[in-house]
Amino acid sequence: MKKKQKVLILTLIVFTFGIIIFRNISLKPLYNESISLFVEEQGTSSGHVKLIQPRFSFGITDNFEENFVYISFKNFRSNRVLKKEVEKYIQSYEKIECNNKIYYFDSKEGYTIVEYSVENHIIYSTINYKYIFGNYCDK
């Protein structure tokens, strides 16, 4: 009985350390291939959005509110690592400023990221983007 308990405890320890290490790694390349989404919703603008999805992301969800589109990815990696990767990715966009706030515009695809965040949960993190088609500062 004691041998089975020791094996179980050792397995749990190895598994726990594996999760801790996995959540804190930063892999190259940082992103899977970009995903191209065609968004069409009655009463809103429509078009293609090309977002880069952090490695190991899953559970893509979207939502519409007025002319804004919300998209979320879930990921098992740590909040800290994902924040760095998302911020690096966001810096590739053209910065535009209006209303004393900075937005991120993709002139090639024609949409603006209005907000983004990375939320920490116990087991996973959630990456959220809020965007609108067109240049937000021109509206």
Image (cartoon, helix red, strand yellow):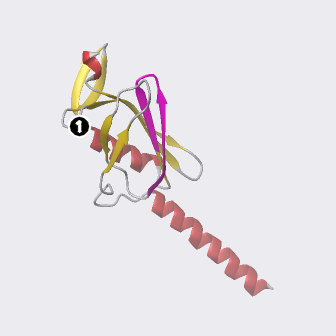
Q: Give the range drawn in magenta.
A: 57-72
Horizontal and vertical percent position of residue 129: 41, 36
- Say what amino acid the circle numbered 1 marks: Glu
Image location (x, y in percent) of residue 76: 50, 55
Q: Position of residue 114 (x, y in %)?
A: 35, 27
Q: In this view, does 9 lie above or below 95?
A: below
Q: Which residue is drawn at 68% across and 74% down?
A: 9
**Is the N terminus in the top left, top right, bottom left or bottom right quadrant?**
bottom right
Above or below, 34 relative to 116: below
Residue in the image at 33% along x and 60% along y: 27
In the foreground, 116 or 81:
116
Number of labels in the image equals 1
Is 59 contained in the magenta span?
Answer: yes
Q: Which of 40 and 7 is in front in this view?
A: 40
* Relative image position of residue 92 (x, y in whole percent): 22, 40
| SS class, disc 1 | loop
Please give the name of the residue rendered at 40% of the width and 26% of the height, measured from the top-left corner: 44
- Local crowd size for mark 1, using a 10 Å CA cut-off: few (<14), some (14–19), many (≥20): few
Residue where numbered disc 1 is placed: 109
Q: Which of 109 and 16 is in front in this view?
A: 109
Q: Name above or below for residue 55 compared with residue 91.
A: below
**Please, what is the dominant secondary structure of the magenta stretch?**
strand
Residue that appears at 19% across and 32% down = 107
Q: Say whether residue 41 is magenta.
A: no
